[in-house]
Image (cartoon, rainbow, N blue to C red):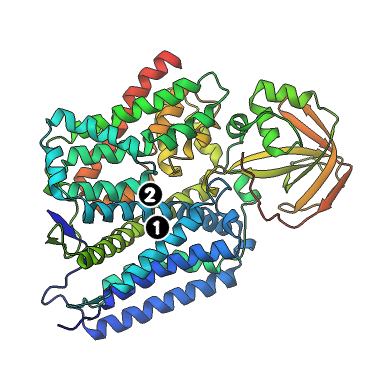
Amino acid sequence: MRRTFSGSRVATGLALGAWAGLFWFLLVSDRTSLYLSSRTAWLVPLGAVIASIATLGRLATARVLHPEPLGARETWLLGAMVLPVVVLLALPPATLGSFAVDRRSSASGIGSSARVVSGQIDLVDIAAARAVVDAESALRARAGERVTIEGFVTEEPGEADRFQLTRFVITCCVADATISYVTVVDAPPGGFETDEWVRVTGPIYPLGSDILVQAESIERIDAPDEPYLTP
Amino acid sequence: MALDVEPRVTQGSMPSQARRGPALLWVVALLAGTAALVRVADPSSLPWLRNLLIVFGSLLVEAMPFILLGATVSALIEVLVPSSAFARIALLPRGLQVPAAAVAGVAFPVCECGSVPVARRLAAKGLAPSAAVTFMLAAPIVNPVVVASTFVAYRGRDTLWVMVLGRLALGFLVAMTVGWVMGRIRSGELLRARMGETATSDRGPAEGRWRRFFSHLAGDAVFMTRFLIVGAALAATIQTFVPRSIVDSVASLPILSLVAMMALAFVMSLCSESDAFVAASFTAFGPASQLAFLVFGPMVDLKLTALYMGTYRRGFVRAVVIAAGTTTLVATLWIQVIWG
Protein backbone atom coordinates (compact mmCIF):
# COMPACT_ATOMS: atom_id res chain seq x y z
CA MET A 1 0.00 0.00 0.00
CA ARG A 2 1.07 3.58 -0.61
CA ARG A 3 1.96 5.82 2.32
CA THR A 4 0.43 9.31 2.49
CA PHE A 5 0.97 12.24 4.83
CA SER A 6 -0.93 12.21 8.07
CA GLY A 7 -2.35 15.64 8.91
CA SER A 8 -2.13 14.90 12.63
CA ARG A 9 1.54 13.92 12.45
CA VAL A 10 2.51 16.88 10.29
CA ALA A 11 0.74 19.28 12.66
CA THR A 12 2.43 17.71 15.70
CA GLY A 13 5.78 18.00 13.93
CA LEU A 14 5.14 21.66 13.17
CA ALA A 15 4.20 22.35 16.82
CA LEU A 16 7.46 20.76 17.97
CA GLY A 17 9.21 22.72 15.23
CA ALA A 18 7.83 25.92 16.71
CA TRP A 19 9.50 25.08 20.02
CA ALA A 20 12.71 24.19 18.23
CA GLY A 21 12.49 27.54 16.48
CA LEU A 22 12.06 29.34 19.80
CA PHE A 23 15.17 27.69 21.27
CA TRP A 24 17.23 28.45 18.15
CA PHE A 25 15.94 32.04 18.22
CA LEU A 26 17.00 32.47 21.84
CA LEU A 27 20.39 31.04 20.98
CA VAL A 28 21.02 33.14 17.88
CA SER A 29 19.57 36.39 19.25
CA ASP A 30 21.53 36.00 22.49
CA ARG A 31 18.37 36.30 24.59
CA THR A 32 19.01 33.26 26.78
CA SER A 33 20.19 35.50 29.60
CA LEU A 34 16.74 37.15 29.74
CA TYR A 35 15.30 33.88 31.04
CA LEU A 36 18.07 31.63 32.35
CA SER A 37 21.23 32.03 34.41
CA SER A 38 24.66 31.32 32.99
CA ARG A 39 24.59 28.04 34.93
CA THR A 40 21.56 26.76 33.06
CA ALA A 41 22.14 28.43 29.69
CA TRP A 42 23.13 25.03 28.30
CA LEU A 43 19.48 24.03 28.44
CA VAL A 44 18.69 26.22 25.42
CA PRO A 45 21.00 24.43 22.95
CA LEU A 46 19.90 21.13 24.47
CA GLY A 47 16.25 22.04 23.93
CA ALA A 48 17.01 23.27 20.41
CA VAL A 49 18.75 20.02 19.44
CA ILE A 50 16.19 17.63 20.96
CA ALA A 51 13.21 19.61 19.66
CA SER A 52 14.81 19.75 16.19
CA ILE A 53 15.47 16.01 16.17
CA ALA A 54 11.91 15.35 17.39
CA THR A 55 10.55 17.64 14.68
CA LEU A 56 12.59 16.11 11.86
CA GLY A 57 11.86 12.59 13.06
CA ARG A 58 8.15 13.33 13.32
CA LEU A 59 7.97 14.87 9.87
CA ALA A 60 10.13 12.12 8.34
CA THR A 61 7.72 9.51 9.69
CA ALA A 62 4.57 11.48 8.88
CA ARG A 63 3.81 9.35 5.80
CA VAL A 64 1.76 6.40 6.96
CA LEU A 65 -0.45 3.71 5.52
CA HIS A 66 -3.51 4.90 7.43
CA PRO A 67 -3.22 8.68 7.84
CA GLU A 68 -4.94 10.26 10.83
CA PRO A 69 -6.73 13.51 9.99
CA LEU A 70 -6.22 16.58 12.13
CA GLY A 71 -9.31 16.95 14.30
CA ALA A 72 -10.68 20.23 15.64
CA ARG A 73 -9.84 19.38 19.27
CA GLU A 74 -6.27 18.40 18.39
CA THR A 75 -5.91 21.60 16.35
CA TRP A 76 -6.85 23.71 19.38
CA LEU A 77 -4.54 21.76 21.69
CA LEU A 78 -1.60 22.14 19.33
CA GLY A 79 -2.46 25.83 18.98
CA ALA A 80 -2.32 26.17 22.76
CA MET A 81 1.08 24.49 22.71
CA VAL A 82 2.39 26.98 20.15
CA LEU A 83 0.85 30.03 21.86
CA PRO A 84 3.70 30.56 24.40
CA VAL A 85 6.20 30.30 21.55
CA VAL A 86 4.43 33.11 19.71
CA VAL A 87 4.28 35.23 22.88
CA LEU A 88 7.99 34.81 23.63
CA LEU A 89 9.00 35.48 20.04
CA ALA A 90 6.86 38.65 19.94
CA LEU A 91 7.97 39.88 23.36
CA PRO A 92 10.58 42.65 23.09
CA PRO A 93 13.71 42.10 25.21
CA ALA A 94 12.62 42.78 28.79
CA THR A 95 13.85 42.12 32.32
CA LEU A 96 12.32 42.11 35.77
CA GLY A 97 12.16 45.56 37.30
CA SER A 98 11.07 47.39 40.43
CA PHE A 99 7.58 45.84 40.22
CA ALA A 100 9.13 42.46 41.03
CA VAL A 101 11.25 43.75 43.92
CA ASP A 102 8.31 43.69 46.36
CA ARG A 103 7.60 40.12 45.34
CA ARG A 104 11.09 38.74 45.90
CA SER A 105 13.21 37.75 48.89
CA SER A 106 16.66 39.11 49.48
CA ALA A 107 19.49 37.06 47.99
CA SER A 108 21.21 36.43 51.29
CA GLY A 109 21.15 32.66 51.02
CA ILE A 110 22.48 32.59 47.51
CA GLY A 111 25.19 35.10 48.26
CA SER A 112 26.33 33.25 51.33
CA SER A 113 26.62 29.96 49.52
CA ALA A 114 28.43 31.42 46.58
CA ARG A 115 31.58 33.13 47.84
CA VAL A 116 33.19 35.41 50.35
CA VAL A 117 33.89 39.01 49.52
CA SER A 118 37.04 39.22 47.44
CA GLY A 119 38.27 40.98 44.31
CA GLN A 120 36.00 43.52 42.62
CA ILE A 121 32.97 44.01 44.85
CA ASP A 122 29.60 43.41 43.22
CA LEU A 123 26.05 42.85 44.41
CA VAL A 124 26.59 39.12 44.93
CA ASP A 125 29.32 40.02 47.42
CA ILE A 126 26.87 42.45 49.03
CA ALA A 127 24.34 39.63 49.41
CA ALA A 128 27.03 37.41 50.92
CA ALA A 129 27.97 40.14 53.39
CA ARG A 130 24.37 40.38 54.56
CA ALA A 131 24.22 36.67 55.35
CA VAL A 132 27.60 35.39 56.48
CA VAL A 133 29.72 36.76 59.28
CA ASP A 134 33.02 36.06 57.46
CA ALA A 135 31.83 37.83 54.33
CA GLU A 136 30.52 40.74 56.38
CA SER A 137 33.91 41.04 58.13
CA ALA A 138 35.71 40.91 54.78
CA LEU A 139 33.51 43.67 53.41
CA ARG A 140 33.84 45.76 56.57
CA ALA A 141 37.61 45.55 56.25
CA ARG A 142 37.27 47.19 52.85
CA ALA A 143 35.09 50.07 54.08
CA GLY A 144 35.83 53.28 52.20
CA GLU A 145 37.14 51.41 49.14
CA ARG A 146 36.02 52.88 45.83
CA VAL A 147 33.62 50.56 43.99
CA THR A 148 31.71 50.64 40.72
CA ILE A 149 28.35 48.90 40.78
CA GLU A 150 25.71 48.61 38.06
CA GLY A 151 22.01 48.07 38.68
CA PHE A 152 18.60 49.62 38.31
CA VAL A 153 17.06 52.33 40.48
CA THR A 154 14.43 51.49 43.05
CA GLU A 155 12.98 54.10 45.34
CA GLU A 156 13.98 54.82 48.91
CA PRO A 157 10.71 56.34 50.22
CA GLY A 158 11.04 59.73 51.91
CA GLU A 159 14.69 60.22 50.98
CA ALA A 160 15.16 62.56 48.03
CA ASP A 161 18.94 62.26 47.79
CA ARG A 162 19.22 58.51 47.98
CA PHE A 163 17.91 55.47 46.17
CA GLN A 164 18.46 51.76 46.17
CA LEU A 165 20.63 50.27 43.47
CA THR A 166 19.19 46.82 42.88
CA ARG A 167 19.99 43.75 40.87
CA PHE A 168 18.27 40.40 40.66
CA VAL A 169 20.30 37.28 41.40
CA ILE A 170 19.17 34.11 39.67
CA THR A 171 20.45 30.58 40.05
CA CYS A 172 18.56 28.70 37.35
CA CYS A 173 15.80 30.84 35.86
CA VAL A 174 14.06 34.13 36.47
CA ALA A 175 11.37 32.39 38.52
CA ASP A 176 13.92 31.87 41.32
CA ALA A 177 15.13 35.49 41.24
CA THR A 178 16.07 37.11 44.53
CA ILE A 179 17.22 40.66 45.12
CA SER A 180 20.48 42.25 46.18
CA TYR A 181 20.91 45.99 46.66
CA VAL A 182 22.97 48.83 48.09
CA THR A 183 21.73 52.21 49.20
CA VAL A 184 23.20 55.03 47.13
CA VAL A 185 23.54 58.32 49.05
CA ASP A 186 24.37 61.85 47.86
CA ALA A 187 22.46 61.31 44.63
CA PRO A 188 21.00 64.35 42.87
CA PRO A 189 17.44 64.66 44.24
CA GLY A 190 14.95 63.52 41.64
CA GLY A 191 17.71 62.95 39.14
CA PHE A 192 16.91 59.34 38.36
CA GLU A 193 13.74 57.44 37.70
CA THR A 194 12.68 54.06 38.95
CA ASP A 195 13.88 51.18 36.75
CA GLU A 196 16.57 53.29 35.15
CA TRP A 197 19.88 51.42 34.76
CA VAL A 198 22.84 53.31 36.21
CA ARG A 199 26.51 52.80 37.03
CA VAL A 200 27.44 54.21 40.43
CA THR A 201 31.02 54.87 41.52
CA GLY A 202 32.05 55.85 45.03
CA PRO A 203 33.30 54.59 48.37
CA ILE A 204 31.37 51.78 50.04
CA TYR A 205 30.42 51.80 53.73
CA PRO A 206 28.95 48.64 55.26
CA LEU A 207 26.95 49.61 58.34
CA GLY A 208 25.56 46.31 59.55
CA SER A 209 22.79 45.22 57.20
CA ASP A 210 22.69 48.71 55.68
CA ILE A 211 25.36 48.98 53.01
CA LEU A 212 25.88 52.44 51.55
CA VAL A 213 27.69 53.73 48.49
CA GLN A 214 28.45 57.44 48.58
CA ALA A 215 27.95 58.49 44.99
CA GLU A 216 30.87 60.31 43.38
CA SER A 217 29.47 59.72 39.93
CA ILE A 218 26.25 58.25 38.61
CA GLU A 219 26.07 57.42 34.94
CA ARG A 220 23.02 56.28 32.99
CA ILE A 221 23.65 53.05 31.07
CA ASP A 222 21.73 50.63 28.89
CA ALA A 223 20.51 47.43 30.50
CA PRO A 224 23.47 45.01 30.35
CA ASP A 225 23.48 41.97 28.09
CA GLU A 226 23.36 39.81 31.21
CA PRO A 227 20.86 41.68 33.38
CA TYR A 228 20.78 39.06 36.13
CA LEU A 229 23.68 38.10 38.36
CA THR A 230 24.57 34.48 38.99
CA PRO A 231 26.39 33.48 42.17
CA MET B 1 1.90 -4.50 27.14
CA ALA B 2 3.03 -1.32 25.45
CA LEU B 3 0.85 1.56 24.52
CA ASP B 4 1.01 3.44 21.27
CA VAL B 5 0.55 7.16 21.70
CA GLU B 6 -0.82 7.77 18.23
CA PRO B 7 -4.41 8.85 18.08
CA ARG B 8 -6.47 6.33 16.15
CA VAL B 9 -9.59 7.84 14.78
CA THR B 10 -12.44 5.46 15.13
CA GLN B 11 -15.40 5.24 12.81
CA GLY B 12 -17.86 7.99 13.45
CA SER B 13 -15.43 10.21 15.32
CA MET B 14 -13.61 11.53 12.28
CA PRO B 15 -14.07 15.29 12.15
CA SER B 16 -15.43 16.71 9.00
CA GLN B 17 -13.40 18.93 6.74
CA ALA B 18 -15.93 21.67 7.53
CA ARG B 19 -15.12 21.53 11.27
CA ARG B 20 -11.39 21.10 10.78
CA GLY B 21 -11.04 24.06 8.42
CA PRO B 22 -12.54 26.72 10.72
CA ALA B 23 -10.61 25.37 13.73
CA LEU B 24 -7.32 25.70 11.89
CA LEU B 25 -8.23 29.20 10.72
CA TRP B 26 -9.27 30.25 14.22
CA VAL B 27 -6.06 28.91 15.71
CA VAL B 28 -3.90 30.69 13.13
CA ALA B 29 -5.88 33.90 13.70
CA LEU B 30 -5.50 33.54 17.47
CA LEU B 31 -1.74 33.08 17.20
CA ALA B 32 -1.36 36.04 14.82
CA GLY B 33 -3.61 38.19 17.02
CA THR B 34 -1.63 37.29 20.13
CA ALA B 35 1.66 38.22 18.46
CA ALA B 36 0.21 41.55 17.37
CA LEU B 37 -1.27 42.21 20.82
CA VAL B 38 2.05 41.54 22.58
CA ARG B 39 3.80 43.99 20.25
CA VAL B 40 1.10 46.67 20.53
CA ALA B 41 0.53 46.36 24.29
CA ASP B 42 4.27 46.99 24.88
CA PRO B 43 4.75 45.00 28.10
CA SER B 44 7.60 47.30 29.14
CA SER B 45 4.99 49.96 29.96
CA LEU B 46 2.86 47.49 31.90
CA PRO B 47 5.08 46.20 34.73
CA TRP B 48 2.67 43.46 35.83
CA LEU B 49 2.37 42.10 32.30
CA ARG B 50 6.13 42.25 31.80
CA ASN B 51 6.67 40.40 35.09
CA LEU B 52 4.03 37.80 34.22
CA LEU B 53 5.40 37.07 30.75
CA ILE B 54 9.05 36.95 31.84
CA VAL B 55 8.39 34.52 34.71
CA PHE B 56 6.07 32.43 32.53
CA GLY B 57 8.66 32.33 29.74
CA SER B 58 11.55 31.51 32.04
CA LEU B 59 9.69 28.57 33.60
CA LEU B 60 8.92 27.19 30.14
CA VAL B 61 12.40 27.78 28.70
CA GLU B 62 13.94 25.99 31.67
CA ALA B 63 11.46 23.12 31.98
CA MET B 64 10.79 22.33 28.31
CA PRO B 65 14.23 20.80 27.62
CA PHE B 66 13.66 18.48 30.59
CA ILE B 67 10.26 17.51 29.18
CA LEU B 68 11.93 16.75 25.85
CA LEU B 69 14.71 14.83 27.58
CA GLY B 70 12.20 12.88 29.64
CA ALA B 71 10.13 12.12 26.55
CA THR B 72 13.28 10.90 24.78
CA VAL B 73 14.19 8.56 27.63
CA SER B 74 10.57 7.47 27.79
CA ALA B 75 10.54 6.68 24.05
CA LEU B 76 13.84 4.79 24.31
CA ILE B 77 12.42 2.70 27.15
CA GLU B 78 9.35 1.99 25.06
CA VAL B 79 11.31 0.91 22.01
CA LEU B 80 14.39 -0.75 23.46
CA VAL B 81 13.33 -2.28 26.76
CA PRO B 82 11.06 -5.28 26.46
CA SER B 83 8.11 -5.61 28.79
CA SER B 84 9.65 -8.83 30.10
CA ALA B 85 12.39 -6.78 31.81
CA PHE B 86 9.76 -5.05 33.90
CA ALA B 87 7.91 -8.28 34.42
CA ARG B 88 11.06 -9.61 36.13
CA ILE B 89 11.14 -6.59 38.44
CA ALA B 90 7.49 -7.17 39.13
CA LEU B 91 8.41 -10.66 40.35
CA LEU B 92 10.37 -9.13 43.24
CA PRO B 93 8.56 -9.16 46.57
CA ARG B 94 6.35 -6.09 46.80
CA GLY B 95 8.31 -4.91 49.81
CA LEU B 96 11.49 -4.76 47.69
CA GLN B 97 10.00 -3.21 44.55
CA VAL B 98 9.39 0.16 46.15
CA PRO B 99 12.88 0.64 47.70
CA ALA B 100 14.48 -0.62 44.48
CA ALA B 101 12.52 2.00 42.50
CA ALA B 102 13.58 4.74 44.91
CA VAL B 103 17.24 3.77 44.60
CA ALA B 104 16.89 3.71 40.81
CA GLY B 105 16.06 7.40 41.05
CA VAL B 106 19.70 8.06 41.95
CA ALA B 107 20.67 7.19 38.39
CA PHE B 108 18.27 9.64 36.72
CA PRO B 109 19.73 13.13 36.98
CA VAL B 110 16.89 15.28 35.69
CA CYS B 111 14.37 17.37 37.52
CA GLU B 112 10.74 16.57 38.23
CA CYS B 113 9.30 17.48 34.83
CA GLY B 114 11.43 14.80 33.15
CA SER B 115 10.58 12.08 35.62
CA VAL B 116 6.82 12.20 34.96
CA PRO B 117 6.87 10.89 31.37
CA VAL B 118 9.45 8.26 32.34
CA ALA B 119 7.33 7.03 35.25
CA ARG B 120 4.30 6.95 33.01
CA ARG B 121 6.18 4.85 30.49
CA LEU B 122 7.47 2.50 33.20
CA ALA B 123 3.92 1.99 34.48
CA ALA B 124 2.61 1.47 30.95
CA LYS B 125 5.35 -1.14 30.40
CA GLY B 126 4.15 -3.15 33.37
CA LEU B 127 6.14 -1.88 36.35
CA ALA B 128 4.04 -1.96 39.50
CA PRO B 129 2.27 1.41 39.91
CA SER B 130 3.63 1.78 43.44
CA ALA B 131 7.20 1.35 42.15
CA ALA B 132 6.66 3.72 39.22
CA VAL B 133 5.28 6.41 41.52
CA THR B 134 8.12 5.90 44.00
CA PHE B 135 10.63 6.37 41.20
CA MET B 136 8.81 9.47 39.96
CA LEU B 137 8.80 11.13 43.38
CA ALA B 138 12.30 10.08 44.46
CA ALA B 139 14.30 10.76 41.27
CA PRO B 140 14.01 14.58 41.33
CA ILE B 141 15.33 14.68 44.91
CA VAL B 142 17.88 11.89 45.30
CA ASN B 143 19.75 12.24 42.01
CA PRO B 144 23.40 13.39 42.23
CA VAL B 145 22.83 16.75 40.54
CA VAL B 146 20.23 17.78 43.11
CA VAL B 147 22.34 16.50 46.01
CA ALA B 148 25.28 18.54 44.67
CA SER B 149 23.18 21.69 44.22
CA THR B 150 21.86 21.34 47.78
CA PHE B 151 25.43 20.99 49.03
CA VAL B 152 26.52 24.13 47.17
CA ALA B 153 23.51 26.11 48.38
CA TYR B 154 24.22 25.37 52.04
CA ARG B 155 28.00 25.29 51.88
CA GLY B 156 29.50 27.27 54.77
CA ARG B 157 26.48 26.92 57.02
CA ASP B 158 26.15 25.00 60.26
CA THR B 159 23.14 23.18 58.88
CA LEU B 160 24.94 21.93 55.74
CA TRP B 161 24.76 18.21 56.50
CA VAL B 162 21.34 18.40 58.11
CA MET B 163 20.07 19.87 54.87
CA VAL B 164 21.96 17.63 52.43
CA LEU B 165 21.46 14.33 54.24
CA GLY B 166 18.03 15.33 55.57
CA ARG B 167 16.80 16.08 52.06
CA LEU B 168 18.21 12.82 50.73
CA ALA B 169 16.73 10.76 53.56
CA LEU B 170 13.36 12.50 53.48
CA GLY B 171 13.26 12.17 49.69
CA PHE B 172 13.63 8.39 49.99
CA LEU B 173 11.29 8.19 52.98
CA VAL B 174 8.42 10.21 51.55
CA ALA B 175 8.67 8.65 48.08
CA MET B 176 8.67 5.10 49.50
CA THR B 177 5.84 5.88 51.91
CA VAL B 178 3.70 7.20 49.09
CA GLY B 179 4.66 4.12 47.07
CA TRP B 180 3.59 1.80 49.84
CA VAL B 181 0.36 3.75 50.36
CA MET B 182 -0.33 3.19 46.66
CA GLY B 183 0.66 -0.46 47.00
CA ARG B 184 -2.67 -2.02 46.17
CA ILE B 185 -3.50 0.12 43.18
CA ARG B 186 -3.66 -1.74 39.86
CA SER B 187 -2.15 -0.57 36.59
CA GLY B 188 -5.54 0.10 35.10
CA GLU B 189 -6.38 2.45 37.96
CA LEU B 190 -3.23 4.53 37.56
CA LEU B 191 -3.00 6.06 34.12
CA ARG B 192 -5.50 8.26 32.38
CA ALA B 193 -6.36 6.87 29.01
CA ARG B 194 -5.23 9.00 26.12
CA MET B 195 -7.47 9.49 23.15
CA GLY B 196 -7.36 6.37 21.00
CA GLU B 197 -4.56 4.55 22.77
CA THR B 198 -4.07 1.08 21.39
CA ALA B 199 -1.80 -1.77 22.20
CA THR B 200 1.20 -2.49 20.03
CA SER B 201 3.83 -5.15 20.05
CA ASP B 202 7.09 -4.58 21.91
CA ARG B 203 9.64 -5.05 19.25
CA GLY B 204 9.49 -4.63 15.56
CA PRO B 205 11.78 -4.37 12.57
CA ALA B 206 14.40 -1.62 12.59
CA GLU B 207 12.33 0.81 10.52
CA GLY B 208 9.26 0.26 12.63
CA ARG B 209 11.28 0.80 15.75
CA TRP B 210 12.48 4.25 14.64
CA ARG B 211 8.97 5.13 13.55
CA ARG B 212 7.65 4.11 16.97
CA PHE B 213 10.47 5.97 18.73
CA PHE B 214 9.58 9.29 17.09
CA SER B 215 5.91 8.59 17.52
CA HIS B 216 6.32 8.12 21.28
CA LEU B 217 8.77 11.01 21.59
CA ALA B 218 6.39 13.42 19.88
CA GLY B 219 3.34 12.04 21.65
CA ASP B 220 4.83 12.32 25.14
CA ALA B 221 6.38 15.75 24.50
CA VAL B 222 3.16 17.24 23.14
CA PHE B 223 1.07 15.63 25.86
CA MET B 224 3.26 16.88 28.73
CA THR B 225 3.83 20.34 27.27
CA ARG B 226 0.21 21.40 27.47
CA PHE B 227 0.08 20.68 31.19
CA LEU B 228 3.44 22.33 31.76
CA ILE B 229 2.04 25.46 30.10
CA VAL B 230 -0.97 25.49 32.44
CA GLY B 231 1.23 25.03 35.52
CA ALA B 232 3.74 27.67 34.44
CA ALA B 233 0.92 30.14 33.76
CA LEU B 234 -0.54 29.59 37.24
CA ALA B 235 2.84 29.88 38.94
CA ALA B 236 3.68 33.05 37.02
CA THR B 237 0.30 34.56 37.86
CA ILE B 238 0.74 33.93 41.57
CA GLN B 239 4.35 35.15 41.55
CA THR B 240 3.13 38.32 39.84
CA PHE B 241 0.08 39.20 41.88
CA VAL B 242 0.79 37.89 45.40
CA PRO B 243 3.26 40.15 47.26
CA ARG B 244 6.05 38.23 48.93
CA SER B 245 5.38 40.09 52.19
CA ILE B 246 2.03 38.31 52.49
CA VAL B 247 3.58 34.91 51.89
CA ASP B 248 6.45 35.66 54.29
CA SER B 249 4.14 36.83 57.06
CA VAL B 250 2.16 33.60 56.86
CA ALA B 251 5.35 31.55 56.73
CA SER B 252 6.73 33.19 59.86
CA LEU B 253 4.01 31.78 62.10
CA PRO B 254 5.82 29.16 64.21
CA ILE B 255 3.35 26.29 64.04
CA LEU B 256 2.31 26.91 60.48
CA SER B 257 5.79 27.54 59.13
CA LEU B 258 6.11 24.01 57.75
CA VAL B 259 2.77 24.12 56.00
CA ALA B 260 3.49 27.62 54.77
CA MET B 261 6.84 26.58 53.29
CA MET B 262 5.21 23.60 51.61
CA ALA B 263 2.54 25.91 50.23
CA LEU B 264 5.25 28.27 49.03
CA ALA B 265 7.06 25.42 47.29
CA PHE B 266 3.77 24.42 45.68
CA VAL B 267 3.16 27.93 44.39
CA MET B 268 6.68 28.75 43.23
CA SER B 269 7.01 25.56 41.16
CA LEU B 270 10.80 25.69 41.13
CA CYS B 271 13.08 23.18 39.47
CA SER B 272 14.53 20.73 41.99
CA GLU B 273 17.99 21.56 40.72
CA SER B 274 17.62 25.20 41.76
CA ASP B 275 15.20 25.22 44.67
CA ALA B 276 17.90 24.73 47.32
CA PHE B 277 19.29 28.17 46.52
CA VAL B 278 15.88 29.73 47.02
CA ALA B 279 15.25 27.73 50.20
CA ALA B 280 18.62 28.87 51.54
CA SER B 281 17.53 32.48 51.07
CA PHE B 282 14.74 31.99 53.64
CA THR B 283 17.19 32.57 56.46
CA ALA B 284 14.43 33.34 58.98
CA PHE B 285 13.24 29.75 58.82
CA GLY B 286 14.77 26.75 60.52
CA PRO B 287 16.10 23.66 58.74
CA ALA B 288 12.83 21.76 59.19
CA SER B 289 10.84 24.41 57.33
CA GLN B 290 13.44 24.57 54.60
CA LEU B 291 13.45 20.77 54.29
CA ALA B 292 9.66 20.80 53.97
CA PHE B 293 10.13 23.23 51.08
CA LEU B 294 12.84 21.09 49.47
CA VAL B 295 11.10 17.74 49.79
CA PHE B 296 7.48 18.64 49.05
CA GLY B 297 8.17 21.05 46.18
CA PRO B 298 9.80 18.55 43.78
CA MET B 299 6.97 16.08 44.47
CA VAL B 300 3.93 18.34 44.34
CA ASP B 301 3.73 21.83 42.88
CA LEU B 302 1.45 23.76 40.56
CA LYS B 303 3.04 22.72 37.29
CA LEU B 304 3.50 19.12 38.46
CA THR B 305 -0.12 18.90 39.59
CA ALA B 306 -1.18 19.94 36.11
CA LEU B 307 1.15 17.29 34.66
CA TYR B 308 -0.16 14.63 37.08
CA MET B 309 -3.77 15.53 36.28
CA GLY B 310 -3.07 14.94 32.64
CA THR B 311 -1.18 11.71 33.22
CA TYR B 312 -2.91 9.93 36.08
CA ARG B 313 -6.45 9.38 37.22
CA ARG B 314 -7.88 12.10 39.46
CA GLY B 315 -8.31 9.93 42.56
CA PHE B 316 -4.73 8.78 42.30
CA VAL B 317 -3.43 12.37 42.06
CA ARG B 318 -5.45 13.32 45.12
CA ALA B 319 -4.02 10.36 47.03
CA VAL B 320 -0.43 11.23 46.03
CA VAL B 321 -0.83 14.86 47.10
CA ILE B 322 -2.34 13.90 50.45
CA ALA B 323 0.17 11.12 51.14
CA ALA B 324 3.21 13.19 50.12
CA GLY B 325 1.97 16.21 52.06
CA THR B 326 1.14 14.27 55.21
CA THR B 327 4.40 12.30 55.24
CA THR B 328 6.50 15.40 54.60
CA LEU B 329 4.69 17.28 57.34
CA VAL B 330 5.04 14.54 59.94
CA ALA B 331 8.71 13.89 59.13
CA THR B 332 9.67 17.55 59.18
CA LEU B 333 7.74 18.07 62.42
CA TRP B 334 10.08 15.56 64.03
CA ILE B 335 13.07 17.38 62.56
CA GLN B 336 11.66 20.66 63.87
CA VAL B 337 11.48 19.14 67.32
CA ILE B 338 15.09 17.97 67.11
CA TRP B 339 16.83 20.77 65.17
CA GLY B 340 14.34 23.64 65.23
> Which residue appears farthest toward the bottom when viewing the image?
B18
Q: Chain of mark 1?
A: B
Q: Chain of mark 2?
A: B
Q: Whole-Å distance between the Cαs marked 2 and 1? A: 8 Å
Camera-nearest residue between A81 and B66? B66
Residue B98, x across and y down, in percent: 21, 32
Camera-nearest residue between A103 and B125? B125
Label 1 SS = helix
Amino acid type for the residue under numbered disc 2: Lys
Residue under pointer 1: B229
Q: For residue B258, which quarter of the picture?
A: top left
Is residue B140 shown left or right of residue B11?
A: right
Discs 2 and 1 carry the same chain letter: yes
Residue under pointer 2: B303
Is residue A105 shown left or right of residue B182?
A: right
Amino acid type for the residue under numbered disc 1: Ile
Whether residue A109 is visible to the viewer of this picture, yes or no, is: yes
> Which residue appears farthest toward the top when viewing the image?
B338
Residue at the image position 48 percent from the left and 76 percent from the top:
B33
Whether tag 2 and tag 1 are in contact, CB under 8 A, the answer is no
